[in-house]
């Protein structure tokens, strides 16, 4: 497992026309990384077997409420068992409740929110060919008090549900409308509004952040305009939108999808979000990830960006740690995923590869109420994070540098309030699961010791650049590097680590490769 990333990277580079042959320099770095002594710190990986954890909540005294789902049956009568258990500090599980959701359909749980009365599970029930927005309340002991689906919003489903004073505020997008639904403590819909705007025809939001005002929320995602989705953020109150803005990120081609994948309220005020963008107007398909910081009115205070030419790249699940730093999940092609650490101003300060040696992949989110980002969920596993956000395996620790600040253009949108829909609340009946499936929830734990040093990597920043770049290489000796244009032709040679002036080259994308290896970094000259 330790060299899976190495093999995948070589395959990706070979398919893009870049040589993947290895010279003694790379092998020396590779062997050195494998031979280094293990660090003294270790983390636990919890394997729930056939059950898939969807929520982990700290409930005090070292205990955690774990909520898992287990599929059962076959479509169209597919159902899901919801299993809850209390896990102690040593991850010994005490089963509390195991309940089958009796209604036919397939369930997907989107998010969970901790309230003073317990846990709210936000999900989607796919039934009779339609998605139905659904909410479920659990006590701290894992018992279900009510479970409802909410009709009247078309196929819209709640992207997130948040506590607001003595109620719950949930947001759903359906076509051109954004719905704000207020749900009482007993699950009854007690208020709803619908918002559109005159400049967009579709709305697709993915992230919501509570504000200082209990009744106001910041909603972030994407809207379709002239056939292309663009990042959009709005502040929503009880009677409508206070402001709504669209954000254009400076991708070279000027077209392509962009949207907000995550947004949080920053400790020092304002909001920090992640915008992912794609541009297919230059050779290959380039993917961009931006971390952007806003004030309370949605004005951009700073923005940092990075790019990659590959079959896919996305950054998501932004959280802010108690230190003020940020953590995110970054996904590359072939399901290669990292947990990245950023400073409070967006500097990249840490990377951890979640593939080797413990095969953590398809990361579904960072979690942990008392210590945000302390755990990560991956399939049927929960991994405990270490000092630098490493669930296990090799950590690429950086101490300086990061993508350059970039400018973002903002377009104010005109919000329009429309006649709100009538929300029909339909209770979902629950029943104990059948005797033949009465096995209790169980799991096993594995202690994994992290490796202190990473495999070889090369970084080039800022991206994009106006002429000067800094090269970082995690080896102890300088190495020759080659700058290749989009056709694979060598246009410049230098050494890494060090600074390099590429202002004499023509604007566009370039590949920086350690000579004779597959260790590379992406450059874009403005």
Image (spheres, rainbow, N blue to C red):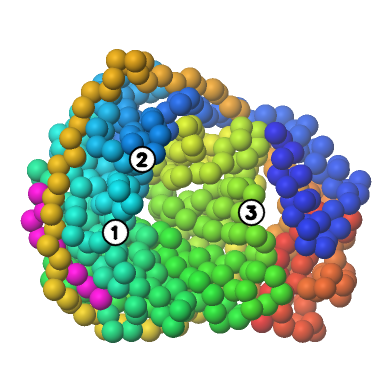
Q: Residue at x 17, y 76 (%)?
A: 418
Q: Magenta span covers which residues?
A: 188-196
Residue 340: percent from left, percent from top: 55, 51
x 35%, y 64%: residue = 205
The secondary element bearing badge 1 is classed as loop
Q: Position of residue 173 (x, y in %)?
A: 29, 64
Q: Residue at x 75, y 72 (%)?
A: 510
Q: Residue 404's spot in the image, x, y percent?
A: 58, 71
Q: Residues within 10 Å of mark 3 (few under 14, many from 20)?
A: some
Instruction: Pinpoint residue 272: horizontal percent, then vertical percent.
Output: 40, 63
The residue that disc 2 covers is 76
- Earlier sequence position, callout 1 versus callout 3: 1
Question: Which of pointers 2 and 3 lies earlier in the amino acid sequence?
Answer: 2
> Element under label 3?
helix
Which residue is at a point 33% across and 84% down the rendered structure image? 199
Asked if the residues shown at circle 1 and circle 3 are in contact, with their CB atoms under 8 angstroms apart, the answer is no
At label 1, counting other C-alpha atoms closer than 10 Å, the crowd grade (few under 14, some 14-19, many 20 or more) is some
**Number of numbered discs present?**
3
Mark 1 vs mark 3, foreground winner is: 1
According to the image, label 1 marks what residue? 155
Query: Which residue position holds label 3?
Result: 333
CA distance separating discs 2 and 3: 32 Å
Front residue (pair 412, 283): 283
For the question of whether residue 484 can be seen, the reply is yes
Front of the two marks 2 and 1? 2
């Amino acid at each position: 497992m330790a060299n899976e990333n190495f093999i995948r990277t070589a395959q990706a580079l070979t398919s893009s026309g870049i040589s993947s042959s290895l010279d003694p320099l790379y092998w020396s770095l590779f062997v050195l990384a494998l031979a280094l002594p293990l660090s003294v710190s270790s983390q636990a990986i919890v394997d729930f077997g056939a059950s898939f954890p969807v929520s982990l909540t700290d409930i005090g005294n070292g205990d955690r409420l774990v909520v898992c789902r287990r599929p059962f049956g076959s479509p169209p009568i597919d159902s899901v068992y919801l299993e809850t258990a209390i896990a102690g500090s040593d991850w010994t599980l005490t089963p509390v409740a195991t309940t089958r959701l009796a209604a036919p359909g397939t369930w997907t749980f989107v998010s969970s929110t901790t309230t003073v009365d317990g846990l709210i599970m936000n999900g989607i029930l796919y039934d009779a060919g339609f998605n139905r927005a659904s909410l479920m309340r659990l006590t701290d002991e894992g018992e279900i008090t009510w479970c409802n689906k909410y009709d009247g919003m078309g196929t819209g489903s709640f992207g997130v549900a948040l506590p607001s004073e003595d109620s719950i505020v949930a947001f759903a997008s359906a076509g051109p409308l954004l719905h704000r639904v207020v749900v009482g403590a007993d699950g009854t819909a007690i208020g709803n509004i619908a918002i559109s705007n005159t400049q967009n025809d579709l709305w697709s939001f993915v992230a919501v952040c509570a504000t200082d005002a209990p009744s106001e929320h910041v909603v972030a995602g994407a809207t379709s305009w002239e056939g292309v989705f663009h990042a959009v953020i709005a502040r929503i109150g009880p009677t409508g939108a206070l402001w709504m803005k669209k954000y254009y990120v400076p991708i070279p081609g000027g077209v392509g999808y962009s949207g907000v994948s995550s947004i949080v309220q920053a400790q020092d005020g304002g909001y920090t979000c992640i915008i992912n963008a794609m541009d297919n107007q230059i050779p290959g398909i380039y993917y961009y990830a931006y971390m952007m910081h806003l004030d309370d009115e949605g004005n951009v205070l700073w923005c940092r960006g990075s790019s990659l030419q590959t079959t896919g790249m996305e950054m998501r699940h932004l959280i802010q740690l108690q230190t003020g730093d940020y953590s995110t999940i970054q996904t590359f092609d072939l399901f290669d995923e990292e947990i990245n650490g950023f400073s409070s101003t967006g500097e990249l300060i840490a990377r951890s590869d979640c593939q080797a040696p413990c095969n953590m992949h398809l990361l579904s989110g960072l979690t942990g109420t008392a210590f945000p980002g302390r755990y990560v969920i991956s399939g049927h596993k929960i991994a405990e994070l270490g000092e630098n956000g490493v669930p296990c395996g090799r950590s690429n620790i950086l101490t300086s540098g990061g993508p350059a600040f970039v400018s973002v253009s903002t377009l104010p949108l005109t919000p329009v309030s429309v006649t709100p829909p009538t929300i029909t609340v339909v209770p979902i009946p629950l029943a104990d699961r059948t005797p033949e499936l009465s096995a209790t929830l169980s799991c096993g734990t594995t202690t994994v010791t992290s490796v202190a040093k990473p495999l070889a990597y090369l970084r080039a920043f800022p991206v994009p650049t106006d002429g000067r770049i800094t090269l970082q290489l995690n080896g102890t000796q300088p190495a020759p590097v080659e700058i290749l244009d989009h056709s694979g032709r060598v246009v410049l040679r230098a050494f890494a680590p060090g600074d390099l002036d590429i202002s004499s080259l023509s604007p566009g994308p370039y590949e920086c490769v350690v000579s004779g290896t597959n260790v590379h970094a992406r450059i874009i000259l403005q």
